[in-house]
Amino acid sequence: MVSTVKRGTINMPKILRHLSHRTSNVREVVFQRDAIYDKDYAKFRQDNASKAELSGPPVNFGYETSSTTPASFDKVQDSGTITHRYINTPELTIGGLNVLQTPVISRSGRLERTGARISGECKFYTPSLATIRQLDNFSETTQFDEFESYDKFIDIERAVYTPSDITSTGNQTIFISEGSTYNPGYEVDRIRFKIKTADNLESITLNGQEGGSGVALRWEAVDTCTPTDWLLIDLPIRDITANDTKEVYQNGTGLTFKADPASLDVDKLSGDSNNYLSYLQIATSSSSTIELKDINIYKSAEWSLETIKDYRDEYMQISAVRIRGDRTSRRRTHG
Amino acid sequence: MAKDYLNIIERALMMGLSDKINAVVTGDIHIYGQFPETEDLKFPAIVVQQVSSGFEEKFQGEKITFGSDATSSTGEIYGVSFLVHLVIDKETTIKIDTTGNGTPDTDYKQRRLINWLMLNIANSIMEINWSDYEEEELVITERHLAAWRDIGFIQEVQWYGATAEFDIYFLNKR
């Protein structure tokens, strides 16, 4: 089918490609939208199906449950049948989005009631929505339609550990601290890499030493993940508790990864001989060729989208604020 | 462990209000917690917003008897305040029983509908039998719907609305 995307008078993808050779203000960000859960509704008195049905439409209490299980029920009303409907809507985490970020206020400290808040603001210039909707994953998932307020872009604020690319076979162990080098963990927030192998990706484990004892965060693939083409993995490594889940999108489908174990607390790893990040392990189901590139254990910046100016076929200008952030020095001191 | 009274009362209030007011009209009146997402909003909308809560009255020795249980427990009277917002748009129509024969017969719109809803929401709130809606046993000692205020029309969105303060006092068994 002939592409119906109009390129506009400004070829934004081409501009971004050219600019990226000259300035690091062109960023490859991860688009993130939080999961949307089912809402709490009552159809019966005492919210109990054995009691009388409430007159009127279902009562919407206005808060979400923790359920992501598809559900629906009908209620016959004066106005006809009202159907409460929920379809599974996990978080969206899609990488590979190139944007121009300028100008940026990276950090702006404010003393507030709850203490110091570090925030910032910036503008993103992105290709047109029609172009973005043609990109890998964006084009394939039905969950993405357009950017919305409160969506997030996750950027690499600072690349902390960038191991070399790897072409090898089977499981891989990548050392972060070797010999008498004891690299700290408190600086890092997330891990990102691209992987290609004919085997299933089974787990990604970041290991460390805390107080001289081994600790680990293992992201285990719950769904089968076979990255026969380059697959971008981007997962958090801070503030994770056991059994947390995250999604990695491949061809528009969310593949669930579960944290188990999650004893690694990166803030505790201050970078001495007893407290340090030691190595990264990437485990696959067999011993086929595995390629890893652009491995980056990084400090992230989370930008929350506020105002979206859509210049139709040309580009979008998005004002964003940094709502979370903390002082790295405090992370190290207080763990 | 104390019961989760604030949630039980808020949910019972929303269920009771919806059940009572919808029983006497033809057309759907929608009840929401604070605040409905725009995708969910339908008119007429009644929004129940909890705005404050706290201890109202303590007893000697902080002892109470709760419901049918004659044994003494620790507790006091606790109060919770709601704002009840009522919103309709210019086109909202509800069929009302004006003859008293139990059959809604006349279409009410705009200010006429707001006036009817204000009084009938007040009536519904006073008539709620908590035991029909409570998910755990409650002892509600008082309920007061104070004056409706901010009755008006917002030109920009063509909405009519009004707000009332509503207080409930209940036994908080700890």
Image: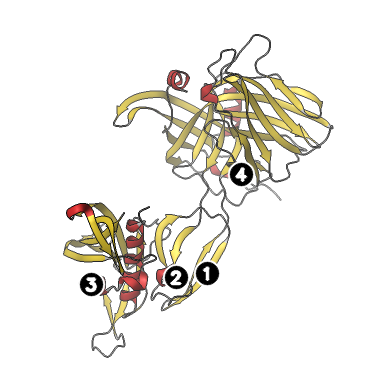
Residue on which the image places disc 3: B126
In the displayed structure, B115 sits above or below B149; it is below
Foreground mark, 2 or 4? Answer: 2
The kind of residue tagged 3 is Met
- Is the residue under label 2 in contact with that under label 3 (CB below 8 Å)? no
Residue on which the image places disc 4: A138
Question: Is residue A160 at least partly visible in the picture?
Answer: yes
Label 4 lies in what chain?
A
Residue on which the image places disc 1: A73
In the displayed structure, A256 sits above or below B173; it is above
In the displayed structure, A190 sits above or below B98; it is above
Q: Position of residue B95 (x, y in %)?
A: 31, 80
The kind of residue tagged 1 is Phe
Label 3 lies in what chain?
B
Q: Is residue B171 left or right of residue A238?
A: left
Q: Judge by depth and name the residue closer to the eye, A78 or A218.
A: A218
N-terminal label among 4 and 1:
1
| SS type, badge 1 | strand
Q: Which residue is depicted at the point 65% across and 33% down?
A: A218
Q: What's the distance in space between the residues labelled 3 and 4, CA to CA?
A: 52 Å
Foreground mark, 1 or 2? Answer: 2
Q: Image quarter for residue A205?
A: top right
